[in-house]
Amino acid sequence: MNRIAPSAAAAAALFLAPLAAADVLVLKDGRIIDGPKMEQKDGHVTVEFEAGAVEVKDALVDILLQEGKEIAFVPQTDEEREKFEKGFVRFEGRWKKIRSAKKEIQKRVASRVDEAREDVAHSEWMDRYQVESSHFQWHFTTPRRTTQRYIDACDAYFEIFKKDWKIKRDKKKPKLAINFFADRGEFQQVSGAGGGTLAYFMFIGDYDLCAFYDRLDPEFTEQVLFHELGHYLHKLIDEDFRYPHWPGESLCEYYGGASWDPDKKKLTVGQIQNGRLKTIQSDIERGEKIGLRKMITTRGFYDYTWGWSFVHFLMQDPKRAKQFKKFFLGLATDKSVKRERSWSQNLKNVTGEEVLRYFMECMKLEDENDLLKLEGEWYDYIENDLSFEGENALVWEAKTASSLGERDRARKLYQTAYKRSPEAMPASAHFAYAQMLGSSMESRQHYRMAVDKAPLTPVYRWSLGEALEKSSKEGEKEEAELHKAIALELDPYVERDHGRIVITMD
Amino acid sequence: MLHLPAARRSSLALLIALPLAAPSLALAAPATAAAPAAAAAPLVQKDKKKKKKAPKGVHRNTRFGFEFRVPKKWSNIAIKTDEEWLGAKYVSETEYSWTDPDDGWTWQYAPELIVVAFPREVMEKGGKDVEETEKDGEKVVKIKFTNPYKDYDDFLRRTFKDGGFYKSAEEEDEIDGVKVTKRTYLAEKLARTGPKTIETWIYHTDDVDYAVQIVGLTKSWKKIQQRTKSVRSSFKLIEREGPIKHSGATGDQVTLTFLDLNEGTPEERKSRAIESEKTMHEKAIARLPDEGWTHKREKRVLLLSSADKRWSKRVLSHTNNLLDWLDDNYGYLNTGSYMRAPIIRCCKDRDERSAFAAGVDSGGMGGWWFLDRELVTYKDDTGWIDGWAIDDLNTQLYRYWMSENNGALQTGMPSWIDSGLQELVSQMRMDSRKPVFRVDAWEVERFREAANQGNLSSARDLFLMTTKEYHNYEGSGGNFWSRRSQAAMLINYLASPEMRKGRGAKGLLEEYLKNMITVIDQIEKEREADLDEARKKLKDKDGEKEYRAARRKIFVEQEKLLLERTFNLTFHDWDERDWKQFEKGFNSAYGVK
């Protein structure tokens, strides 16, 4: 039997059987496969499933444990050969005795196996990990090692925000619980979130943040966490106050775009939100610019896009950043601000018009002309100073367009993204694009690329199988069966959950 | 909160009936007096006449073969007509309360009991059915794919709608020789009416798993456990009346497809509709619980009711009168269809209404979903006139009437008209044949305020407003509700003889809707190729949902055109002065300056 763990769907006791009794593959995204025979060569690991072989690129592999295989060192240079004969190998840049190097490797592998066992033991929500970090109480079913990155990043985020905005947590209250689920299915079931929700912060009662780990898009997972965490940090300014959509969501996006370097343990804020910038540019191309007055006084999706860029614009100028900070903090705390208490949540709110009035006061804008002048500067900033960083802006924008129901635009964006940098396009984008292309040859090509980049994702493989079934090309029908069989071996429910009605004519 | 669309997912229903084999040999041994009841259980009882009536206070299900003692003061809840998995459903007459510590609101919750049977053969088949036929000498392989429950957890995931939940404890046990898995789940996050406990014991036999699920407020769990002790101690497996026939259906099924309603001669369509009506009614009556429910067909409505006689009588009379009124006033929309008599299920109270919708993964919403076969209401203790239940029933009845009379118009018309018509009908009370028109005072006030503040576009613009524009929450999100009130008032104005005193209003709605039907016909012809493509989805009966979505998509794409053509047909001879007078008449009817 082939086993992949951990995930919410996986049975709890998978790894109680001795791990080393079979080949074991630990992937960098935390999943573990044991059962099939495996072989590593030519830059990939071949996993022999019952239905057929799957090649997994070394770049995706964390550890491969092979049953009965001795640890072997193969010297590559003359120096290494000479040292090897004297009983030494190069180990992490230093010469070490072969025996002690082997011992060290065995120790590390054993420790990883223990970690894997531990992860499986915590893969159901009732057995979840509960870890207290400097600023949060983490509950998670994700692999411990994978999660550490997010734990560190969120603590660093708290520290930076605390310093920037002078917030402090009421020590009498418990630390914020961050519930981090292994996948979307578990997130929806346990958190009660519906439909397209990616994460939420419960801002009344005992605060609660729920999010899930998207193993195919770890950076996006980080951004979602940062965004929701932003709402919590805003609460710490005044827990009795609820920030208006603008500037609340926009500041969350500003910090949501931070990037965490897990090696240097460094968080950099104020990055360009590529997807958001692309949305703004698309709006401009269509001749749609959001006015400052409208953005400040009303709520809309533009608070995530145009709103983010406006905060970015203000924060890069020290003088304006200071004024903006005064405004943001003052919305909740300044006695001159007129607040109303909401009937439903019993929290204080500010109307759009009052937000604008106070904003103008803090930014020292005297009249409509000043406001329009600032608006003009902001538009210039978007045009001249904001430019893409990274290759995936188009993919992110495509995701946004898709979530807004703009399917044609999303399709065109994926198309351009692929043309510009096919290598940078993630598996999930190939898959989403393939779905939009219907049953064409191009669609099959993108399903193939999704499978190539994420070879152990059952739904990608299943969909490739379905797409190939319709092909008239020689051999593709047989290939379809192979992909479907492997997909079913990886996840027996893949057809039931993702299959489509098939009507075939023989 | 961040959103992205949900993942693609198939949720179609299996339509073929699947007779299950007799229970396995191990469990088919004859029962003896000494043998434990559960172990000796599911014998096939060949002679149905021998079926004994359950003793008082005992729930006996001979289809699945189980029985248990019902706790005192728990009511038997009807099960949806097509639902195939539920074997019993009860709700406590005692409500427990929970006060939300954050907002101080107190919620009442009545504990529920459900027995679900998972026949192994249906589960293993996995909802996949391969059918081979021949057409024009070619072999056609049809794979019908569906998503019935994978296991109990999957059932819970799909049917529990009271917040997020997780398994908090599990224990394996054996009762009278039957293996039992005892699980506890806690529903804590987003549990709006209070944190709940779900306690389920799953009895595993060779051919069926029986899940006995009890749900109640965690705060009162000990009391609830005490009161449901009898269920746990008395649950046992008994003889079945025969092999289990199982269609796999998890909710209401399509009873008349779009093709049934729209293709063939009028006589053929009528004959199909009459046949479907007969089957629907017979099945609904046959699946009523033995006690507590009555059924009555009066004129154009079949009423299934557990409410008191007076309320039931009033519902029957009101709905018949409302259907007549719709025919009298909007009969011109009918495309020659035979209207099947709706089934109205009237629960005795709100708790029973909510328990009726529990444990099913589709439908049960009472007319809001096209698969909802029945219109569901309840006796509203806040009153006939002021209660929300009759408003809601009216809206369901309007949707049903429209779907049966002119499905093409229903899927083609812009949202503002649909929403306006719904609002108009929802407020009506028809104790006699003369309607009592009521207007929601809140709606009037909101409309008046928004119009006086200049936050609304003109009525003329509304006639040209697409669904997307109407539902635009961005920018001035709050304005949607004002637009909604404006739409409600405009339809109210055009439909009510008492209100439409202004120039140009009389007969305008009829003319406008008739023109819209003409334009829909034109567009159907122009988009014939696309509609044919969409129609292919209907080759399989399960494609009804997909077809409706595809058709709706085409009309959304053509909406601007539909509105413009309808507008030009209707108002081609109106000039600025006509519009000015029309707007004046409309606005002054509702006190707008």
Image (cartoon, grey):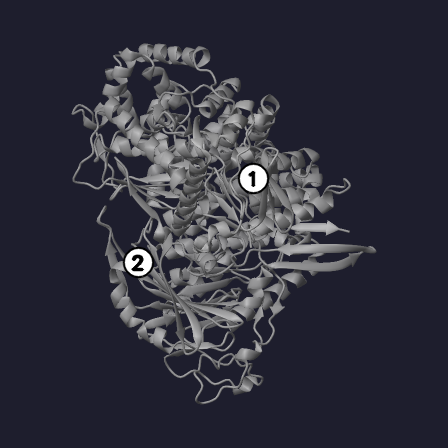
Percent coordinates x, y for residue A485 in the rendering: 64, 50
Q: Nearer the viewer, residue A127 or B581?
A: A127
Q: Position of residue B299 (x, y in %)?
A: 52, 67
Q: In this view, which residue lies farthest toward the bottom?
A: B33
Looking at the image, is B98 positioned above or below residue B497? Answer: below
Which of B249/B143 is in front?
B143
Residue ID for mark 1 = B512
Q: Which residue is located at x 44 percent, y 47 percent?
A: B424
Q: Residue at x 51, y 32 (%)?
A: A399
Query: Where on the picture, by quarter, is residue B448?
Result: top left
Quarter occupied by the C terminus of chain B: top left
Three-letter amino acid code at the position of disc 1: Tyr
Mark 1, Cα crowd under 10 Å, few <14 / some 14-19 / many 20+, is some
Q: Quadrant of residue B95?
A: bottom left
Q: Is residue B97 visible?
A: yes
Secondary structure of the residue carrying numbered label 2: loop
What residue does disc 2 label? B382
Chain ID for label 1? B
Quadrant for the N terminus of chain B in the image: top left
Secondary structure of the residue carrying numbered label 1 = helix
Residue A77: x %, y % from top left: 56, 24
The amino acid sitting under disc 2 is: Thr
Pick whichever of labels 2 and 1 is earlier in the sequence.
Answer: 2
Say above or below: A213 vs B137: above
Q: Position of residue B532 (x, y in %)?
A: 70, 44
